[in-house]
Amino acid sequence: CDPVFLLSADQYRKISKVKEKEKYILVYSINKDPLLEQVVDRVSEILKIKVIYVGGFAKKCKSDKFPRGIGPREFLGYMDNAEVIITSSFHGTAFSLIFNKPFIVVPPKLNRLRLDSILEIAGLSNRTISSSDEVESLLMQNIEYDVVNSKLDSFISSSKQYLNESIDDII
């Protein structure tokens, strides 16, 4: 598994910095995408809360806040305290899973193998969206994180076992 899964949500919370007090939608995207913009607009319209965009040097969609130059601690705080996350990124998806957040994935055009793989392992391939018309139904679907966490825990345990055995073989 990706190394971000080797720590628990509680371990990440110990190092995160929280800045926002109000409810918000967090957007973390690698590339600009018209579908991303449509999804963000639709989620914002439905939830009627502000949008915070994090990541990169340029905004990839309309948002109420675009904090620049945030570090990993702030990034973790934004992820953990969001009401819902919209992402096109593997790591945005990974931290949505780690923090047990409702999320929507706007898949990137390229390099989506890891993203699709972790969604499949978690049993959440349905969180990927191809049209803004799907937003409302996705927001209405609760993610059964007890089931998801069980699947991820099994995956993480087997990955840790593999790493430990690999290290033992070297030493």
Image (cartoon, rainbow, N blue to C red):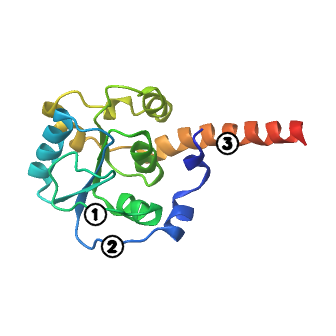
Q: Which mark's residue is nearer the viewer, 3 or 2?
A: 2
Q: Amino acid at mark 2?
A: Lys
Which residue bears the numbered disc 3?
157
Label 1 residue SS: loop
Q: Quadrant of residue 20?
A: bottom left
Q: Quadrant of the N terminus?
A: top right
Which residue bears the numbered disc 1?
67
Q: Residue furthest right?
A: 171
Q: Which mark's residue is nearer the viewer, 1 or 3?
A: 1
Mark number, residue 169: none
- Classify mark 1: residues with Cα within 10 Å, few (<14), some (14-19) or many (20+): some
| Rendered location of residue 170, percent (x, y) | 87, 38
Which residue bears the numbered disc 2?
19
x 82%, y 41%: residue? 167
x 37%, y 25%: residue? 110
Q: Quadrant of residue 32?
A: top left
Left or right side of 7 for 92: left
Q: Amino acid at mark 3?
A: Ser
Q: Amino acid at mark 1?
A: Pro
Left or right side of 140 for 97: right
x 42%, y 52%: residue? 100
The Cα atoms of the two marked residues, 3 and 2, are separated by 33 Å
Q: Which mark's residue is nearer the viewer, 2 or 1?
A: 1
The Cα atoms of the two marked residues, 2 and 1, are separated by 11 Å
| Rendered location of residue 115, percent (x, y) | 43, 33
